[in-house]
Amino acid sequence: YEKLDSLIRHGAGWLNDVGLLIIDEVHFMGNRERGSSIEGFASELMATRDPQIIALSATVGNPEELAEWLGAELVVDGWRPVPLRKGVLARRGSGMVLYMEDGSKYALKTSSIENLVIGLMGEGAQVLVFRATRRMVETTAKKIAKTISGDEAEEVADGLELIKIPRYERATLRHLVRKGVAFHHAGLHPATKKFIEDSFREGLIRCIVCTSTLGAGINTPSKYVIVCDLIRRGLNSAEPMSRIEVEQFLGRAGRPGYDKIGVGLIYAKDMPPEEVVRRYLSGGPEEIRSPLGEDMYHFLLGKLSARRRRSELFSIVGRTLYAKQNSGAIADVDRRLGVLIRYGLVREDGGWIEATDLGRRIAQLYIRPSTAAVMIRIIRSQSLSPTEIFYLLSCTEDGRRAYPRDFDVSVPEGFVESISMSLGGLDTPQSRSAYYTAMILTEWIEEVDDGMIMQKYMLASGDFMSVRSVAEWLTYSLMELAKVIRAGTEKFEVLYYRTKYGVRAELVPIARIGLNRRRARALYEAGYRSVEDVAAEDPSVLSGVLGVGRRTAARIIRSARRIAGAG
């Protein structure tokens, strides 16, 4: 979704030739994080190109309204390749009771979800178990594996040795996969997740305990699906999961070509079974409501990347689901346009309206205007350290997505006050999570060993990659805005490359060749100081310095020559 919306912001010409738009999983339109992207590209294409649109979803509570908005014919089809049976599990005494949606009821002798899963695996079935947190996921998987005797999947454990993943992930998972069990969450290395998914599809792993990451469009059907947690808990909040989310999980049940039926079960430990039936099995899923009002500034800047007539802009706004569901949408947009004009991000002249150079670059970088406002303060201050910059970026709405976990770390006294003074007295939030993220990134650009960083901050490899990826995007955006403002460009360019490659400042010229930081440091210690130094070297000499083959050394030299020539 986000890539298509970004292509429109960059004015990709080939989009004019698009005659068919297929929006899969259109229920994501109601998602706070992703919904505005769907509305962004859908409203643009409907208002300016009018393609044929096919929108797909199994979990929409107001399909008639969405069809009317899209100008589409509603087609409802209840067919599934494998019929799905749904039920609710509840504890009763020393056992459990299973309430099926057809009204039937069964007493089970099993006393826990773990024992139930082991019994199903013993029958040769595959099982997906959804848990709310990573800790629950790993604990449940270990409990299941601990009770299984024998090593029925030794070949899977051997296969785990052949993929390049962090050692601690391999050590943790090896014992589990040997028993035919694995866990899956966003903190795992991508190669680990792919290995687990592939092994499950091949039938080598028969139980995966997972978070919602495995419910999001990944093709891993299973005969049984068990949803164990219905309450999503935050630091100071707790709310029930949506019907749409639970339906997406249960929909994983049933493997075409293997199972005659799929069985989706909900464990009623967070609320009475009657409440679970009412909330998640009776009736239909929730209606999709547009979240665009919460992201309108971001939306408007995206629409104004190209110069438009005011009437054309309001025509696009009128084609949004937000406008269909909110009678005051046009007045709201008019007010927010005024704000963007006052802040110098948009200009209007004689009925034409467009983003300024600064506003256009913000839209193309796909950062929110509120994030850009913080970046502009950073650029103009010129006195902030990398740690302070990372902290401020991590406090933004775009930066908060990088928080790996809630870590018990305190923000040093005077740290926030010092930043506030550097920004001319601007109020600066105090955030433990932002400080935690800033410290991770500071050690990364100081060339602290990856393993030491992950151990010190209790980071999973997937989390570490996510923190670095978001920071790379935000520091790149910071560098690009500095170019538009024409202030501190070199400083922020160095910070971007340090963040991208995880190196100290002196290694930036060499790291830009595309070397990992270990090789870049080896070249620097051997006396190489610039791209030109590497470009002029003989492959046989460079091969000896880096301890690599002549072919690899020649490739590095060719890369250096390309960069030197471009410079």
Image: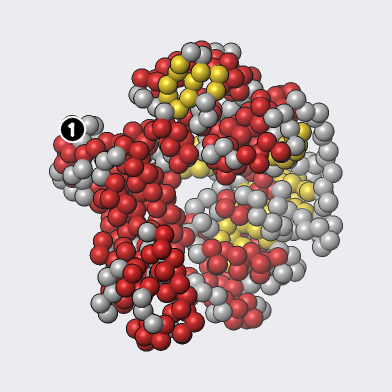
The residue located at (74%, 58%) in the rendering is 223
Q: Which residue is mark 1?
A: 424
Residue 360 location, x and y as percent? 45, 33
- Looking at the image, residue 438 lies above or below residue 231: below
- Residue 468: quarter of image: bottom left
Residue 150 seen by the camera: no
Residue at the extreme front = 565
Q: Quadrant of residue 532?
A: bottom left
Residue at image coords 63%, 77%: 156
Give residue 389's position: percent from left, percent from top.
Answer: 27, 46
Up-down relation of residue 272 to residue 288 (above or below) = below
Query: Which quadrant holds residue 66?
Result: top right
User: Considering the numbered disc 1 on the image, is that residue within a helix, a strand or a loop?
Assistant: loop
Compared across the picture, whether 446 is left or right of 356 comes to left
Dividing the image into 4 quarters, which one contains the C terminus?
Answer: bottom left
Of residue 322 and residue 459, the one placed in the foreground of this image is 322
How packed mark 1 is, by other alpha carbons closer than 10 Å (few <14, some 14-19, many 20 or more), is: few
Q: Position of residue 65 (x, y in %)?
A: 71, 24
Amino acid type shown at disc 1: Gly
Give the x, y percent position of residue 289: 60, 27
- Residue 505 lies, with reference to residue 51, above or below; the image says below
